[in-house]
Image: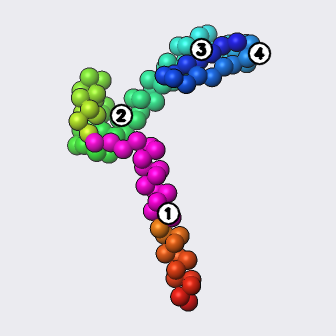
Amino acid sequence: MLTITIGSKSFTLTDEEEKALLTDMEDVYKWVKNLVENKVRQVMDRIIEEQTEYNPRRLTPERKREIIAKLKLKTAVERNMELEEELRKEMEAMRNVERIS
């Protein structure tokens, strides 16, 4: 069995799942690390493109971190909660219009 822990959460692969996975990659740790680091790079680049005048392809990783540190960013959970609230209000408004008609 292989247990992968991220922060306080973890998941476990069975021996068979790990065996199958190792037919596709040499090192599960390196693959997971690369996956997360690449996702971080992509998201940081997107944020910098969308919220600043900088071109992230011309910035060092250190400069990107400095820029991100100064930005006020909402988490995905916060954005989803806001979207759900907007949708709830729109649905309620539609129901009110239907009642009036």
Image quadrant in which the C terminus is located: bottom right
Q: Residue drawn 47% across and 67% down? A: 89
Q: Do the residues labelled 3 and 2 touch (CB within 8 Å)?
A: no
Q: Do the residues labelled 4 and 3 touch (CB within 8 Å)?
A: no
SS for callout 1: helix
| CA neighbours of label 1 inside 10 A, class few (<14), some (14 to 19), many (20+) | few
The residue pinned by badge 1 equals: 87
Q: Residue 60 carries which label?
A: none
Q: Nearer the N terminus, badge 4 or badge 3?
A: 4
- Which numbered disc, 1 or 4, marks the residue closer to the eye? 1
The residue where tag 3 is placed is 28
Q: In this view, does 56 lie above or below 62?
A: below
Q: Distance between the residues labelled 3 and 2?
A: 24 Å
Q: How crowded is mark 3: few (under 14 residues within 10 Å), some or many (20 or more)?
A: some
**C-alpha span from label 3 to label 1:** 40 Å
The mark nearer the N terminus, 3 or 2, is 3
Task: Give how far across and how far down residue 93 sits, in percent.
Answer: 49, 75
Closer to the N terminus: mark 2 or mark 4? 4
Identify residue type, mark 3: Val
- Tag 1 or tag 3, which sits nearer the N-term? 3
Q: Which of marks 2 and 4 is in front?
A: 4
Q: Name the residue under label 2.
A: 44
**In terms of secondary structure, where does tag 2 sit?**
helix
Q: Is residue 64 found left or right of 12 in the rendered image? A: left
Res 59 visible: no
For the residue pair 21 and 81, the one nearer the viewer reads as 81
Among numbered discs 1 and 2, the one appearing first in the sequence: 2
Would you identify the image quadrant in which residue 13 lies?
A: top right
